[in-house]
Amino acid sequence: STALVWLRRDLRLADNPALAHACAHHAQVVPVFIWAPDEEAPWAPGAASRWWLHHSLAALADALAARGSRLLLRHGPTLQALLALAAETGAGAVYWNRLYEPAITARDSAVKAALRATGLRAESFQAHLLWEPWTLASGAGEPYRVFTPFWKAASRAPVALPRPAPDARPAPAAWPASVPLATFGLLPRLGWDTGLRAAWTPGETGALARLGAFTDAALARYRDERDRPGRAGVSRLSPHLHFGEVSPRQVWHAVTTACAGAPLEHPGGEAFLRELGWREFAHHVLFHFPHTAEQPMQERFARYPWAADATAELAAWQRGRTGYPLVDAGMRELWTSGWMHNRVRMLVASFLVKNLRIPWQQGARWFWDTLVDADLAANSLGWQWTAGCGTDAAPYFRVFNPQRQGEQFDADGRYVRRWVPELAALPERWLHAPWTLPTDEQARTRFVPGLSYPRPLVDFAASRAAALAGFEAIRAGA
Ligand code: FAD
């Protein structure tokens, strides 16, 4: 018999339960990817994600071809595409791995019901998360809203062992037609992707190489180095995890092995798995509170007095021209490489929302379009956390100070010098506050504040005070 494997964000052969099930129970297996971005609206993949997807699909197609199989590509609507392919191949079953975002779960349930109504077998599997959102609940039977108790419960739950890639299957007698990958139009028309190509290797091989490099080198020092954006202290696995080129189970068990079987007693292992726990928590929250992709979890924050017209400020933030070196370094790292270090994500988000008083949703949208790891659950949680309006929020009165953050986490200036080359010649002492550079140093370094590099877009202390006054206003009205 023949089965279709509908691939989505599980672009790997190893530890892929839908693929493994199809291979174990069917003589012929037809893997298919269907491009139907409208079905994910309003969160269809952004530009950087589409770039990644293109290369990841190409890599998966090669990996399948090396095993005598193929990756079929079709355009949506998904249901019609699956029904057509089932008819063409005589398939009796369709398998896929579950995702958890609101638009996707709604679409998937409808597809499952419609496939079953035509007599096809339709089955979905757990692959994208370690613990599915409905399997964990607080003592009161409610979804978790705070990370620490979530993690306490979750990290005690067992994590199944990953399974190897299935053996090659006999190909169908005749392969159905596939559209060329180029017809998805995923690559940019203007060549802005040089930095992305230099930074990343999308696909399962690239993901496993990244995981191996991390467990070999950085994991042992992860707890101490993870907050230093100028060091190679973090895994950079986020886009690979988002597209399912490696499964969270594979990551969990690779870390367990590297920590001699007891990762939670290992400082690096514990700190890293806790971050993987944040990924799970983000999905838990979005699944149970689907409105949080657009609306603040704490309703009173919807009344926050945002700046009236901040178009110019938003543009300066997006381009990395705010005059605050660590903020600008982060925004340029994002624009060039499609990724930003977590410490700097928190800072640039705090700066947008608090110092510029621009709604967090606008920052989330920019991230959505520019991050290769753009993920609705993690992005919504990250923005709401920093804005102070989400679950488990950082207190709203915490406003990151870009200069202090720079002095603390990029003390040697390696990160800022890399991404803001105008500042490269400045001594450390002034690097994170270039507007204070004394005149004799200006002459020596040929650096002129306001000319070589923008002066601060806003005064930190005054904008912080305005942000806090805004919070007081909604608190008083609550
Ligand atoms: P590591 O430190 O190596 O962590 C390992 C993995 O754990 C990551 O790959 C990621 O899957 C997960 N993880 C780590 N931190 C978090 C976190 N805070 N929340 C959820 N998962 C986490 N992450 C995304 O994957 N996609 C996003 O769109 C995204 N948007 C964010 C927006 C803001 C404003 C903030 C503050 C954070 C955001 N994050 C997002 C979380 C975090 O910044 C990234 O996951 C992390 O920087 C990825 O780098 P890494 O793989 O080297 O992380």
Image: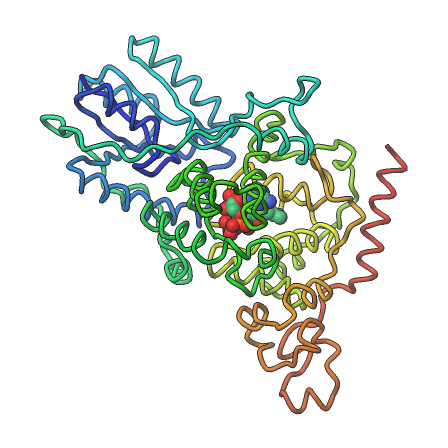
Number of callouts? 0
Is residue 323 visible in the rendered image? The answer is: yes
Residue 261 location (% of width, % of height): 47, 40
Q: Quadrant of residue 58?
A: top left
Residue 179 location (% of width, % of height): 23, 37
Q: Is residue 378 left or right of residue 246?
A: right
Residue projecting furthest to the left? 173
Q: Is residue 67 left or right of residue 349?
A: left
Q: Residue at x 33, y 38 (%)?
A: 12
Q: Quadrant of residue 31?
A: top left
Residue toward you, 337 or 13: 13
Q: Is residue 353 above or below residue 403?
A: above
Q: What quarter of the picture does the N terminus occupy?
A: top left
Residue 397 location (% of width, % of height): 81, 48
Q: Residue at x 18, y 33 (%)?
A: 168
Residue projecting furthest to the right? 476
Q: Quadrant of residue 276?
A: top right
Q: Is residue 218 above or below residue 140?
A: below
Is residue 363 visible in the rendered image? The answer is: no
Q: Is residue 218 above or below residue 170?
A: below
Residue toward you, 459 or 259: 259
Residue toward you, 146 or 186: 146
Residue 29 location (% of width, % of height): 21, 26
Q: Residue at x 72, y 91 (%)?
A: 440
Q: What quarter of the picture does the C terminus occupy?
A: top right
Q: Is residue 76 left or right of residue 41?
A: left
Q: What color scheme is it?
A: rainbow
